[in-house]
């Protein structure tokens, strides 16, 4: 006759043994899975560095999946998920600095040993996620065909390096200033004289998405889904970095500075939206912020688009055009000059009042990071590449004249 108590203990032992085997299989599979993901991402990165054709194919056919999946998940939240993850990552790094030496150098047994193993796996997966999303959603895209090669080849002079001279520069500058002057008097303004959007923020987001989707007719990778842009909670700190917007590749979010002068918003959103579609070079993102806005039917977007490139063009005119010619050019009117700012004096005072570190220190650190990030990814002129939008604007108008 079978003893029920003995049978029950045997069954429990077999169950525990089975669970341990399953756990062992999972633990053995985990590093293999992580290594596989790392190798796959690295292979994609290597392929991108060595093949523009592959990079273009990736942007058009694979990259939209990341925007569609991660962008939709992030869009379930009203605030910036990426901003929260950055804060969480900073807290995790601080905790690791405190507790990691204890876990590494103290004798660990039982629960403490399991905690060390769990902590090691956590760090590995966090680093792998950062490496994967930064590579697939950012670094690979630096190796696509340039916008000039795609769209403006026929507008270049004899295929040479210089696509324009003083005449073309002056013509583009004049068109931008003239339209900005015309639009400046048509917009709704608040009691302080600041241009304001005649609608809700959600309507403005929709207008920006529509403007970008319209660009998808000429540039297929810009078509499709756009999540809502996200306001940054730490916009005062962001202002110290002189940033209007920022793209988070690990959450596929287009984020914007809520402190900046309001008319900057449409061009900034369209700029960051272009990053969400695989346009990673800053001069090209600047261009699409300009083109999408000025080609829209909304005067507020149009005005934002013209102002977004006016400073770049004006600087190039000051550097390249002789004084006697420059004096005869159309000038930005007083209202345009007031609107063509990053922050007003009052906004800067608010930023400085809330500052923990000096703006000079924060801006310098940001510039070093951005410069290193750009040069590391093959952008030899670093942050100066932002101003290459002048060349693209000139080519845009040159192509318009040819058509």
Image (cartoon, helix red, strand yellow):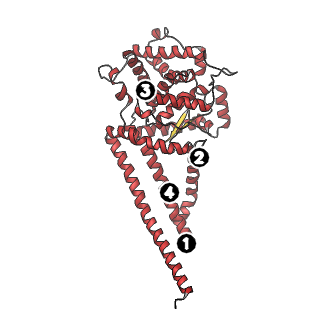
At mark 4, the secondary structure is: helix
Residue 388 got which mark? 3
Left or right: 166 in relation to 116: left
Given this view, does label 4 or label 2 mark the residue nearer the observer?
2
The x, y position of residue 123, in whole percent, is: 50, 57
Looking at the image, residue 378 sits to the left or right of residue 173; the answer is left
Q: Name the residue under label 2.
A: 84
- Alpha carbons under labels 1 and 3: distance apart: 60 Å
Q: How far apart are marks 2 and 3 (CA)?
A: 33 Å
In the rendered structure, are the residues bearing label 4 and label 3 in contact, judged by CB atoms less than 8 Å apart? no
- Residue at the image position 56 percent from the left and 70 percent from the top: 111
Callout 2 environment at 10 Å: few (<14), some (14 to 19), or many (20+)?
few
Q: Report the disc number at residue 187.
A: none
Between discs 4 and 3, the one toward the N terminus: 4
Residue 217 drawn above or below residue 50: above
| Residue 33 drawn at (x, y percent) | 41, 58
Structural crowding at the residue carrying mark 4, measured as other residues with C-alpha within 10 Å and reported as few (<14), some (14–19) or many (≥20):
some
Depth check, front residue: 254 or 42: 254
Q: Is 244 or 216 nearer to us in this picture? A: 216
3D distance between C-alphas at marks 4 and 2 = 18 Å
Q: In the structure shown, which secondary structural element does the residue marked by tag 2 occupy?
A: helix
Q: Position of residue 36 (x, y in %)?
A: 38, 56
Numbered circle sitting on residue 123: 4
> Which marked residue is nearer to the observer: mark 2 or mark 1?
2
Q: Mark 1 points at which residue?
A: 110
Q: Decide if residue 137 is in sight here.
A: no
Distance Cα–Cα, label 2 vs label 1: 33 Å
Q: How far apart are marks 4 and 3 (CA)?
A: 39 Å
Disc 1 element: loop
Q: Which residue lies furthest to the left in this view?
A: 158
Cα–Cα gap, marks 1 and 4: 20 Å
Disc nearer the start of the sequence (2/3): 2
């Amino acid at each position: 006759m079978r003893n029920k108590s003995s049978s029950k203990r045997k069954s429990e032992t077999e169950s525990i043994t089975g669970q341990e085997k399953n756990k062992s299989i999972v633990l053995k599979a985990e590093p293999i899975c992580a290594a596989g993901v790392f190798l796959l991402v690295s292979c994609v990165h290597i392929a991108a560095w060595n093949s523009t054709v592959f990079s273009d194919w990736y942007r058009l056919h694979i990259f939209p999946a990341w925007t569609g999946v991660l962008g939709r998940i992030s869009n379930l939240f009203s605030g910036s998920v990426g901003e929260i993850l950055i804060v969480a990552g900073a807290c995790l790094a601080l905790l690791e600095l405190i507790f990691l030496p204890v876990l590494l150098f103290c004798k660990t047994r039982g629960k403490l040993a399991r905690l060390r193993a769990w902590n090691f796996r956590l760090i590995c997966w966090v680093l792998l996620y950062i490496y994967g999303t930064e590579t697939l959603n950012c670094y690979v895209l630096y190796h696509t065909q340039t916008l000039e090669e795609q769209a403006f080849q026929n507008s270049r002079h004899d295929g040479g390096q210089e696509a324009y001279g003083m005449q073309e520069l002056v013509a583009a500058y004049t068109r931008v200033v003239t339209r900005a002057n015309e639009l400046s008097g048509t917009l709704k303004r608040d009691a302080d004289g600041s241009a304001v959007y005649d609608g809700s923020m959600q309507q403005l987001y929709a207008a920006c998405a529509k403007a970008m989707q319209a660009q998808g007719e000429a540039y297929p990778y810009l078509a499709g889904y756009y999540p809502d842009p996200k306001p940054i909670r730490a916009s005062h700190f962001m202002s110290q970095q002189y940033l209007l917007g920022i793209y988070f590749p690990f959450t596929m979010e287009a984020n914007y500075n809520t402190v900046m002068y309001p008319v900057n918003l449409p061009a900034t959103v369209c700029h960051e939206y272009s990053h969400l579609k695989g346009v990673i070079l800053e001069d090209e993102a600047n261009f699409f912020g300009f083109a999408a806005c000025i080609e829209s039917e909304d005067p507020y977007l149009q005005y934002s688009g013209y102002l977004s490139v006016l400073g770049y063009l004006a600087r190039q005119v000051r550097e390249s055009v002789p004084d006697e010619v420059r004096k005869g050019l159309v000038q930005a009117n007083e209202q345009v000059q007031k609107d063509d700012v990053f922050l007003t004096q009052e906004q800067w005072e608010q930023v400085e009042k809330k500052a923990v570190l000096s703006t000079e220190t924060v801006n310098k650190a940001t510039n070093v990071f951005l410069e290193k990030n750009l040069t590391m990814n093959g952008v030899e002129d670093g942050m100066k590449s932002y101003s290459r939008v002048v060349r693209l604007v000139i080519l845009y108008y040159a192509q318009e004249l040819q058509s």
